[in-house]
Amino acid sequence: MRLADFLNLRTIGGQITALVITSIVAIHLILTGIFLITRPDEVDPGIDRGHAQFAAAVQLLGAAAPTDRPRLMSDLARAFPRLDIEPLPPGPIPEVSDPEGVDLRGLHRRLDSTYRIFPLPNEQSRNRVGVALPDGTMISARVLRDPRPRSFWAGSWTATLLFAIVSVSLLSLWAARALTSPLSAFARAAENFSVNGTAAALPERGPEEIRFVAKALNRMRERITALIDDRTKMLAAISHDLRTPITRMRLRAEFIEDEVHRHRMMGDLDQMRSMLEAVLSFLRNDRKLEAMTLTDIASTLQLVADQFADIDYKVTYQGPEHAMAIVRPDDLTRSVTNLVENSVRYGAHVTVRLTTSTDTATIEVEDDGPGISDARKEVMLEPFVRGDDARNMDETTGFGLGLSIARAIALAHGGKLSLNDRQPHGLIVRIELPVRQPSRMSQAAE
């Protein structure tokens, strides 16, 4: 990568570099402020040296001549007022021991054996002791505690470390979000990709690399949409052109005197026309043919069941009398009709069932036919795959597009279609549809 890329704030590398430099400068500024406030180079006059001052004063008095000690004690009182050194009257030296609450091990280490430290039982202060100098003279002084060493976590470097950790954490979170958020958007766009034009294009914003990928994906989507449009137009043209010779052949077949041959010829021509219309309908299924509307899907399913019952098929409906959902009503009718057509072809009795919840409407088309084995369930959802293995088609076999069209319609609604076993035998085709369309509702809110 070139150096100019690191300095370009429109790229991810440039933004991360700028954030790192800003963090380093901020750390140095904070360190400078902490140093100016605490001034660790200056000695705090309020901090006493404790045992070191006590031992030094006692050793000076012990080394001085008796005649010089009053003057020296006066000087020590001015130099070390907190020691509060005073002479004691002569007398026997008490038993040497550590006064209660006073740890004199540091003093014992600093003074040799010619100096004897003893408690003052009548003294009210717990931090005051007596000292016998080498020549027997006794004095008293206050024992100052040695300042405790600064805690490991009390240094200014701790604030630096914490700030560095916070900066690196924020940098990591920002970098992770900057990289994963567009990738998540790309994944959602790929998952919701549809050639019907309902999905919005990827927003071309953010760092330069992300904008470049978004533009490439949008161009790819446009090319795929154009390719499918061209395919559909070509097949529509073929279908239109084939209808004309089929119509002419039907007219000529009317003049065939043999009734059996004429009937077979008319059946073959009708099957050819049905095949063309089914293939064209399947290829056009992803196109936006109608808008999403609030529909009573319960009434739609009852209508489909009644239409088949009117032509002597045993098709019944089970479910609520009314259930509203945002769907494409014509596509939903077509999907359920295809499923019922398949069911009545293989089963004697078909049940169209509807159950609803707060977010989902579940449509089940159940038959008592032979069912589909687990090994073929996934294959049966592919186009042009029929339920039987016959090579010759007739009016009872179909073209293998019913389940494919129904699944495509369910996916276009943001739902799913699955094949399930019925006990003791038969098949249940289950369609799960969202009652509300999130993309539509959000667009309406905007």
Image: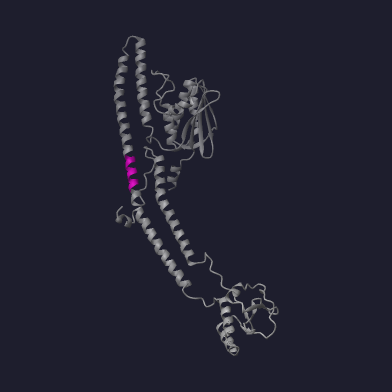
Above or below residue 430? Residue 202 is: below
Quadrant in the rendering for residue 84: bottom right
Above or below residue 172? Residue 263 is: above
29, 205: nearer the viewer: 29
Q: At 32% across and 11% down in the image, what residue appears? A: 256
Quadrant in the rendering for residue 219: top left
Residue range corresponding to the magenta coloring:
212-222
39, 228: nearer the viewer: 39
Answer whether residue 220 is magenta in the image.
yes
x then y, percent, for residue 46:
54, 77
Q: At 40% across and 26% down in the image, what residue appears? A: 401
x then y, percent, for residue 415:
46, 36
Quadrant in the rendering for residue 35: bottom left
x then y, percent, for residue 51:
58, 76
Q: At 35% across and 28% down in the image, what residue appears? A: 280
Helix, strand or loop: magenta stretch:
helix
The answer to whether residue 18 shows anywhere in this view is: yes
Q: At 51% across and 39% down in the image, what residue appears? A: 359
3, 136: nearer the viewer: 136
